[in-house]
Image (cartoon, rainbow, N blue to C red):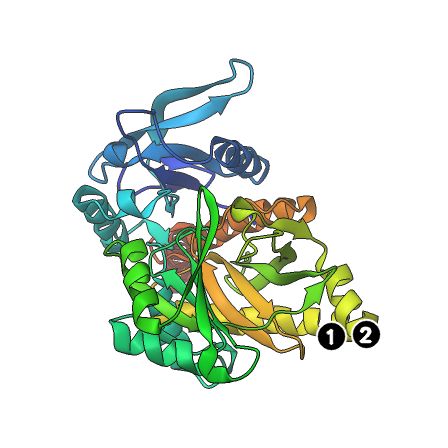
Amino acid sequence: MDFPAHRSPASGRETASPVAAILTYRDDTRIFRGNRDNFIDLLRTAKEEGVTAYIVAQDDLNLRARKLKGYVYSPSKKKWVLGERPFPDVVYNRIPYRKFEQLPEVQEIIRECLAHPTIRFFNPAFFSKWSLFEWLRESKLTRGHIPETVRLAGLGDFARMVRKHRNVYLKPVKGKAGKGIMKVQQLVGKRRASSAGYRLTCQSADGVEATTYDTVTAMYDAVKKYMDGKDYIAQQGITLAVAGGRPFDLRALVQKNDRGEWRVSGIGARVAGASSITTHVPRGGSIGDPTKLLAAVFGPTGGKAILRQARETALVLASQIEKGSGHTLGEMSMDLGVDTTGKLWFFEANSKPMKFDEPHIRKKSLHRLVRFWKYLVASSPGGRAGVAKSRSRARRTELQRSDAKRRKG
């Protein structure tokens, strides 16, 4: 994709390449927060794709300035270098934590980016788990992939879900990477169901702790302490397919391409750890090969069919999530469960995907992301495509005037 030189309305500069600023957060402990290796990979890929890119901290993103202060990485010096950078066409939001993103000064920057006449800004915020399920319930194409999910407002909601489903997961609405998740199980007695108790398993950075309770009320008291005032959802537990004695699910990376269309950049698999209640790698899970895992459970043909269906489902889910959000989105990762019958279930999505460890997915994801930046600039009414069209119209008008003069002469 070639770009004619254009003059940025904000900065007055003229450049032949799109400019992307990767937005992150600066505090008193570091020059900027976020995954440095990821940033280095992004800057390198941007250079390969002919895009000027740099890292900008929230307090350096002055949209009224002609140029900004930003960081690039110097491989020879092995350090980050702060310097004057051109005004951006695209701002890529990589504020790494919700607590930073929710700060008033950061929210103001996000609002300014969204309202700016020339900047293209996408994925403006982390997803709320509850909002995701509300959006997906609005479409008949996606609601069938959602486990029963309720907002945990009190003992009544908790008791109804626990008594209705053999397994229930409790998840923080604003959680990430499996942190703070709890699992509730009914323990059916040997003689009769009335002798059942309940097991509460809590997952934290320190490991997994399981406790048994005789009643739902007693268990809910423990749950409230663990919730610590945070908003939670209660979700129907799905019996996942199991390979090698371990349950697994699928992790899909969905991104827009250089035409602004949703595509699946790759699907990986995550296998639950020996005592973990989720498949998240930071919580004891491990990486698996989805083709081999699905084939082990459903056979080679059945496994391929499920993987193909997972790709199609991920695209439908991404489109509906973007529609529900009301904003332009360019990427997301999502967790898809496969139950023992082969049915696909949506568990969660992340608007700021972490690095995929699978090399083939990682490489494709970097190039696809940068090409989406280029698409945003080329398709912007105030961007290069708009400038090129204006020049073309001006040129046609000039030719028409010259032709008219010749005819008169």
Residue lying at 61% horizontally and 62% vertically, measured from the top left? 250
Quarter of the image where the C terminus is located: bottom left
Query: Which residue is disc 2 drawn over?
Result: 301
Contact flag, marks 2 and 1 (Cβ < 8 Å): yes
Residue assigned mark 1: 305
- In the depicted structure, whether residue 366 falls above or below residue 199: above
Residue type of the residue flagged with mark 2:
Thr
What x and y, as percent, mark residue 330? 46, 57
Residue sitting nearer the eye, 136 or 108: 136
* Residue 169 x %, y %: 44, 66
Q: Nearer the viewer, residue 374 or 72?
A: 72
**Residue at point 21% right, 44% down?**
103
Q: Can you see residue 66?
A: no
Along the line of sight, which residue is nearer the eye, 198 or 227?
198
Front residue (pair 211, 262): 211
Q: Amino acid at mark 1?
A: Ala
- Secondary structure of the residue carrying tag 2 is helix
At which x and y percent is residue 296? 79, 66
